[in-house]
Amino acid sequence: MEKGKRRGEITAYGVIALGAVLMALNYQLFVVENGFAPAGLNGIATMIQYKTGFSIGYLSLIINVPLCVLAYLFLNRSFALRSLAFSLVYSFAFLLFQNLGLENLQYRSDGSDTIFPVILSGVIGGFVYGICFRVNASTGGTDIVSKYISRKKPEWNFFWVTFALNAAVAAVSLFVYAKPDGSGALTYDYDPVCFCILYCFISSFVGNVILRGTKSANKFTIITTHAAQIQQEIHDVLHHTSTQIASVGSFSHNQMTVLICVINKHQVYDLEKILSKYGDTFAFSETVNATYGNFKQVK
């Protein structure tokens, strides 16, 4: 048991380290040269580097180390330590990439078609968010702040708090990326705001797919008078079993059977085809976010 637990810890920290390196490369190649701020406190670090030249690598340490200490004291120790590991690897990897001379690999939109590096960075960022949350870690910054606020104010939804913080970053970017015109007056461009919002949407969507995609399924509740036949077909065709519950119709008072069955998403059509054969059968399905136990992905 201890050996398996130790192996799981090593695997988790390996995933975190790889995610941090990928995120650092993502910022260096697709973010810093394209005039927009991504989500969260790392977006603030990006804007500070844009205005002052002070590296995101150092700023990430300054921002995230105290936040991880806060998380260690008031949230979850494992979550805090793993988030700290991400922040340390991310900062050092970013500083390394910054000094390696990756100019030839950087995507420089020069103010034209910036949407493409936004999409690329959003997909990579979402992937990193997803794999980190799967191992009880975070990329630091806004995630820790949101979790702390939600702990102190349980009535405040975690995702709404995160959204509010990211919206603030988007609003600030309007002023940070303003440029002077010929007369010296600042010209405000809404493109950085839109790019920040688009990045947030893409990264959240991809992260959610990573979190839910591998364990999500469909639960069918079937009310029928042909329970034995349907159960047999579910077993023979879908290689799943179902739970049977005796029931009585509230209007007709007829004896019915309720079958509950959880199947893979790609098997929905097959089950619908089975059910279409039988009269006196009513069914509805629900999306299951995660499944646990002996649930094999079979066709």
Image: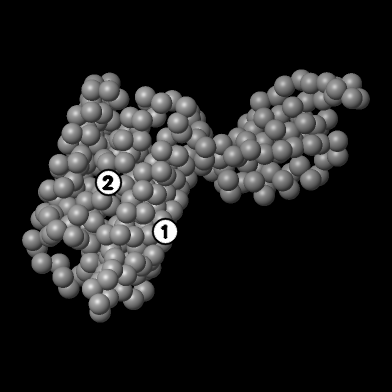
| Badge 2: residue crowd in 10 Å (few <14, some 14–19, many ≥20) | many
* Amino acid beneath label 1: Leu
Q: Residue at x 9, y 63 (%)?
A: 100
Q: Alpha carbon of mark 1 to alpha carbon of mark 2: how far?
A: 16 Å
Q: Which of these two is toward me, 38 or 128?
A: 38
> In the rendered structure, which disc, 1 or 2, sits on the residue that comes first in sequence?
2
Task: Work out whether 247 lies above or below 189.
Answer: above
Residue furthest to the right: 252
Q: Residue at x 17, y 57 (%)?
A: 49
- Residue for badge 1: 198
Residue furthest to the bottom: 182
Q: Which of these two is toward me, 76 or 247?
A: 76
Disc 1 and disc 2 in contact, CB within 8 angstroms:
no
- Residue for badge 2: 41
Could you say where residue 97 lies in the image, as x and y percent from the top left? 13, 59
SS label for mark 1 = helix
For residue 58, say whether it is visible: yes
Q: Which of these two is toward me, 251 or 245?
A: 251
Task: Work out whether 56 lies above or below 61.
Answer: below
Left or right of residue 224, residue 186 in this image: left
SS label for mark 2 = helix
Q: Residue at x 34, y 76 (%)?
A: 112
Task: Work out whether 37 lies above or below 189.
Answer: above
* Amino acid beneath label 2: Leu
Q: Residue at x 56, y 36 (%)?
A: 288
Residue furthest to the left: 99
For residue 130, say whether it is visible: no
Residue 277: quadrant of the picture: top right
Location of the N terminus by quadrant is: top left
| Badge 1: residue crowd in 10 Å (few <14, some 14–19, many ≥20) | some
